[in-house]
Image (cartoon, rainbow, N blue to C red):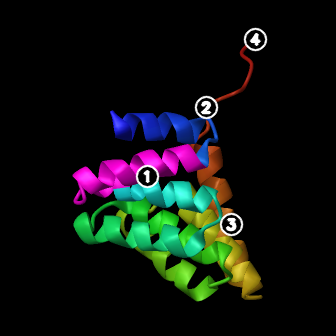
Amino acid sequence: MLYARARVKLDLGQLDAAQQDMQAYLKARPLDASAHFGLGHIYLQGLQFDKAAEEFRQCLTIQPQQTEGYYELGQTELEQDQFQAAIEQFQKTLARDPQHGGALAGMGIAYFKLKQYQQAEEWLVKATSLRRTTSPDTTILG
């Protein structure tokens, strides 16, 4: 119940209440990787980057194959201008899901911030190409 309530409060933008419920849930179930991921997401939304990174790392310690944990950790690093660290996390994401649009775009953004423009362009083209190949067909049939 606490987990579900925390998710609802997060969706409603009630970060403090969501955080309290998720922390209470984790006291009862400290090895729930999804709850650590959820709390990390709450912290990330609240711009508490160090706490977010800690929770994503905890999630990945419990469940190392959790692709989204690497992606969110990369986003956390990107938000803190830790571009090389972000790239490393996005690479881990892409090793598990080569078509992860967020990680592809994140790679492009990180390389752009590092002023490595050719690499940035390559990653951003991959991200936008993926978008075009996975979007529903919007042509009008006559």
The reply to whether discs 3 and 1 touch (Cβ–Cβ < 8 Å) is no
Q: Amino acid at mark 4?
A: Gly
Task: Report the mark closest to the observer, 3 or 1.
Answer: 1
Kindly identify which residue carries mark 4: 142
Up-down relation of residue 33 to residue 3 (above or below): below
Q: Which residues are magenta?
A: 16-35
Local crowd at mark 1 within 10 Å, few (<14), some, or many (≥20)? many
Q: Amino acid at mark 2?
A: Pro
Up-down relation of residue 136 to residue 49 (above or below): above
Cα distance, mark 4 to mark 1? 46 Å
Given residues 41 and 72, the one toward you in this image is 41
Instruction: Give the SS element for disc 2.
Output: loop
The reply to whether discs 4 and 1 touch (Cβ–Cβ < 8 Å) is no
| Left or right of residue 70, residue 43 in this image | right
Kindly identify which residue carries mark 2: 136
x and y percent of residue 99 in the render? 48, 57
Task: Report the mark closest to the observer, 2 or 4.
Answer: 2
Q: Earlier in the sequence, mark 3 or mark 4?
A: 3
Q: Residue at x 53, y 85 (%)?
A: 85
Q: Is residue 108 magenta?
A: no
The reply to whether discs 2 and 3 touch (Cβ–Cβ < 8 Å) is no
